[in-house]
Amino acid sequence: MKDIPITRTPSRRGLLKGIAAGTGTLAAAGAFPGFIQAQSSEPIRLGFQLHRTGIGAAYGRWYERTAQAALQVLNDAGGINGRPVEILFEDDGTDPKRGAEVVEKLATQGRCDAVFGALFSNVVVGSAPRAGELRIPYLVCSEGHHVASGITNRWTLQPGITDVKSQVQAMAPWVAANLGKKVTMVFPDYAFGYDHRDFFTAAMEAQGGEVVELIAIPPTETSFTRHLPRIPSETEVLYHVMVGPAVLTFVKELGEFYGTGDHPEIFGFIDSLEAVDIAGPGLEFLEGTHFWEGHPRCLQPGASEHETFYRAAVGVDDNGASVSDAREVSTYAHMFSAWETLFVIKAGMEAAGYQGPDDRQAFVEAIEAMTEMPLSREHPQGDKVFNGRTHQVFGHQHISKVAEGRLEVVHTTSIEDGLYPDEVDYTTQPF
Amino acid sequence: MDFGPFLLLATMEGLVMAAVLALTAVGLSLVFGVMRVVNVAHGEFFMLGAVLAWFVTASVPGPPALGFAAALVVCPLIVGGIAALADRAILKRLDYDPEATIVATIGLLYIFQQAALSLYGPDARPVQAPFDWRLQFPWFGYSGYKLAVVAAAALLLLGVRQLLVRSRIGLVMRATQYDRETATAFGIDVDRVYALVFALGAALAAVAAVLIVPIQQAHYLMGGDPLLLSFIVVIIGGLGSLRGTVLAAVLIGLSDGIVSVFFSPTLAKILATLLVALVLVFRPQGLFGQRAA
């Protein structure tokens, strides 16, 4: 018996008919948009520049989850101006060149109203010029100082997370008073590390302390032991901030290097251990050391209701790991910025009466007009102050101590601790 | 830190690097020596070894040493199998044409890298060392496992040398390297020898990766550095010369360790690249390579 084919190859005539009908419908829709769908109910489309692959992948996964959770909350509460919101996630491979292409793709092909989400400073610096040329609002979650330093443009804003300059300035007095005044810094040998180097050195000198040695580590390095002998023995505080796939190796090797012998006080940026279980093997050495945290990974006693709501919405347990897998630790200290930025976009668009891409300028101006951001469901990390001239937000920072494998907050800075004179006034620049 | 202990640490770091580099580069050199194939995907075999080591150690219950021992055996076998398959399916069909195989192995590089990204994910994941033994010097502590890596690599290299010099299969390989056509005339199945050599080269890279993965971490982009350094080592040592490759690996590893401790890692890379340039200009066949007839 011969098999009868189930699928038929379409005939040429059938295909042509289909194409003609399709084109007709499209043309009609384009000519009379008002009849197809009322302008006001069309979804607002936001682009998310996501580090799904490349060296920022651990952050990317959690930024995506946080943004999805925030989107759910946002849409459940009626969206923006009564319109539903969609987020288009696009992977940039944590690569600056690809980053600029992603901004372009989201703006032109994706027809997005705004783009947000980038964390790594190289991607932000690489993408901001293209966002400016395309005249699309570009809201970064990067903690780099580049926005407030004035090297980006009027379309680039950082309303969701405090920049490094403010962070280190706010914490330096506590470090000098409680840990020691002679500091050795270990930092990545590129822009993000230089922010730490320059601003912490200055902040420490203002406290009467000094940085006795600077150890810059090339970003491609996979083993660090050979850099550690450069730490002078007079060092009282070792300050470390590392990012990328090799961070765990760095901390382990630090433990091996000092071993059971004497070691200086250690103050690190949690960036060195984001997405890493602090109670994991080889990290016992971290017990008793201190970390900066933008947002405390472990649930603290007396946490606000907004904090618990946010934690549950994103799906993070009391230890900062995924509720579905306790071994999967989040990037808790940074990822709140994706959540808060989305709600800043909502507030900005509603204040500007945003209708479509023609209102992008009004949207940026509405964000520039923002000042106070109180602790709320929209800002679960804490209250903040936004500076419209420098496009930078300022919030509280936390210093935590590792105790029995948990991070316990020992000091919280005030917003005023982190304020510094403006270096730029974007509001005077043309759009 | 005083000069003495400083130098000791730099030397130990350099030795670890040299050990892993020697294993990886010997694989590359062997493939070129016997098959005349420049294997651009060699670094990805290294990466596959590390990634598979993570899978194996994560799936074997019991103490970390057991999982690690399993990985040390299983990973090179799997990676070698994949390499033999790639040889039969691709390189053989190209008739081992030098230009075509370069392009084909570049293709393999992307296939392996993207496969790892899809199946393993973009994260760097740690593999626990088989033992947690630490040496405490008066000036600093040092991981005992790192020293074990140096010893293991030395043993493996000795094994490879014995295989090539003493065993029948080694003789067949050397015969094929010396003159392919005559070897065929003497009844040697050259296709099988090629598949075996390609598998052996890949397995050596995989073993190196399994050894290094408790020190570093398994990541889908980790193949780039070993590839570049292996080429540097192989060019300096002389393509196809095992002795030259091992000596060059020790030279590059130690100088990289010492120069980057006392000066900067960037300077170490500059010096290695400069050395390659000098070798290419003044001794194109490498320090121990034979001049092409």
Image: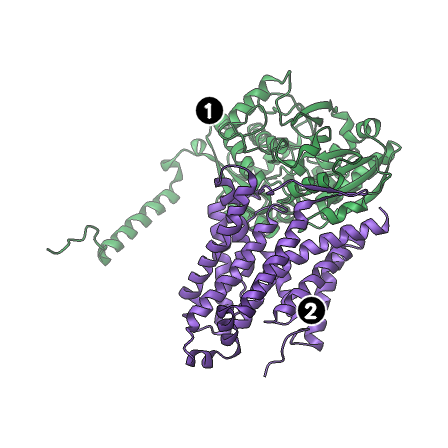
Chain colours: A green, B purple
Q: Nearer the viewer, residue A359 or A305?
A: A305
Q: How much space separates mark 2 and mark 1, taking CA atoms?
A: 62 Å
Name the disc covering residue A76, or none.
Answer: 1
Residue at 63 percent of width and 25 percent of height: A381
Q: x, y percentage for residue B214? A: 61, 45
Q: Chain of mark 2?
A: B
Say what secondary structure mark 1 lies in.
helix
Q: x, y percentage for residue A392? A: 69, 34
Say what secondary structure mark 2 lies in.
helix
- Quadrant assignment for the C terminus of chain B: bottom right
Instruction: Please give the residue where the numbered disc 2 appears in the rendered image.
Output: B276
Give the amino acid type for the residue marked by disc 1 in the picture.
Asp
Q: Nearer the viewer, residue B219 or A75?
A: B219
Q: x, y percentage for residue A83? A: 46, 29
Where B228 sits versus B54, above or below? below
Residue situated furthest right in the rendering: A208
Q: Are marks 2 and 1 on the same chain?
A: no
Give the amino acid type for the residue marked by disc 2 in the picture.
Val
